[in-house]
Amino acid sequence: GQQLNQSPQSMFIQEGEDVSMNCTSSSIFNTWLWYKQDPGEGPVLLIALYKAGELTSNGRLTAQFGITRKDSFLNISASIPSDVGIYFCAGLYMDSNYQLIWGAGTKLIIKP
Amino acid sequence: EAGVAQSPRYKIIEKRQSVAFWCNPISGHATLYWYQQILGQGPKLLIQFQNNGVVDDSQLPKDRFSAERLKGVDSTLKIQPAKLEDSAVYLCASSFLGAAAQYFGPGTRLLVL
């Protein structure tokens, strides 16, 4: 079946640092979504990408739809304590009946 | 705009007991999804509804899990009888018809003892 490889699995960063994470697949995707999940809550949609090469920002977050349509990147600039959580990528490929394929998540931890 | 509502937020039961979860999607969202999320993993789709019809339930363990969306709005997911491995977070999500973006509720945390 379809798979998404999300990396890194976890990140320890200092407050104020920039963060980068990515998702890759061997298949072509039509849509990429980035979610953040806080402990005890459901995933919250951060950014949706619909076209190859698309670059979209949401505050300090920027995500890109890879030109090959097989990958996507999420960057967080100047991290703050509330950025802590698990970030998931999810992708939609053609004929998937709108069922998302999910990455395993990137856990962001800010060093005190 | 109200988000996806789920209840209960937490449930503890013993194995072989039954449990039911309720979800009310965002108003106007025709598509509703139930996911199971094991700790440390991404959500796994159990069942997808479009209005009151099932689009896909291929990953639903039908010997013990059932779900319905009778009036095409809110939905219930039932487990009967529960097993230890059913301990997980059950997430409900909804989307507009034909839209990729799914919006999630807070989830129900189930612990089976």
Image (cartoon, grey):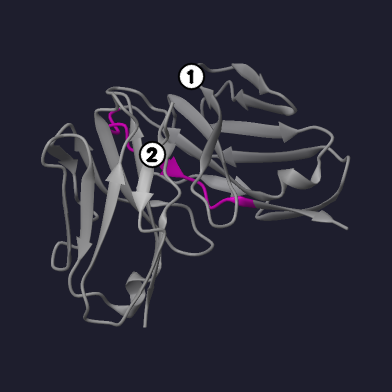
Quadrant in which the C terminus of chain A is drawn:
bottom right
Is B38 inside the magenta-drawn segment?
Answer: no
Residue occupying image coordinates x 17% and y 68%: B64
Q: The disc labelled 1 sits on which kind of residue?
A: Tyr
For residue A38, side relative to residue B96 (left or right): right
Q: The disc labelled 2 sits on which kind of residue?
A: Val
- Please identify, in this view, whether the residue under mark 1 or under mark 2 is nearer the observer: 2
Q: Which mark is residue B100?
A: none
Q: Nearer the viewer, residue A23 or B62?
A: B62
Choose top left, top right, bottom left or bottom right for residue A24: top right
Across and down, in percent, residue A58 comes to: 66, 23
Packing grade of label 1 (10 A; few <14, some 14-19, many >=20) is some
Is A96 inside the magenta-drawn segment?
Answer: yes
Across and down, in percent, residue A88 comes to: 55, 44
SS category of the residue bearing label 1: loop
Q: Nearer the viewer, residue A102 or A25?
A: A102
Please give the range of residues in magenta: A95-106
Residue B3 lies, with reference to residue B14, above or below; the image says: above
Residue occupying image coordinates x 55% and y 24%: A68
Label 2 marks a residue whose chain is: B
Cα distance, mark 1 to mark 2? 24 Å
The prevailing secondary structure element of the residues shown in magenta is loop
Same subunit, tags 1 and 2: no
Residue occupying image coordinates x 24% and y 55%: B59
Residue A44 lies, with reference to residue B20, above or below; the image says: above
Tags 1 and 2 in contact by the CB under 8 Å rule? Answer: no
SS category of the residue bearing label 2: loop
Q: In the rendered image, which residue does mark 2 sit on?
A: B4
For residue A110, side relative to residue B70 (left or right): right
For residue A66, side relative to residue B97 (left or right): right
Q: Which mark is residue A50?
A: 1
Q: Is residue A34 visible?
A: yes
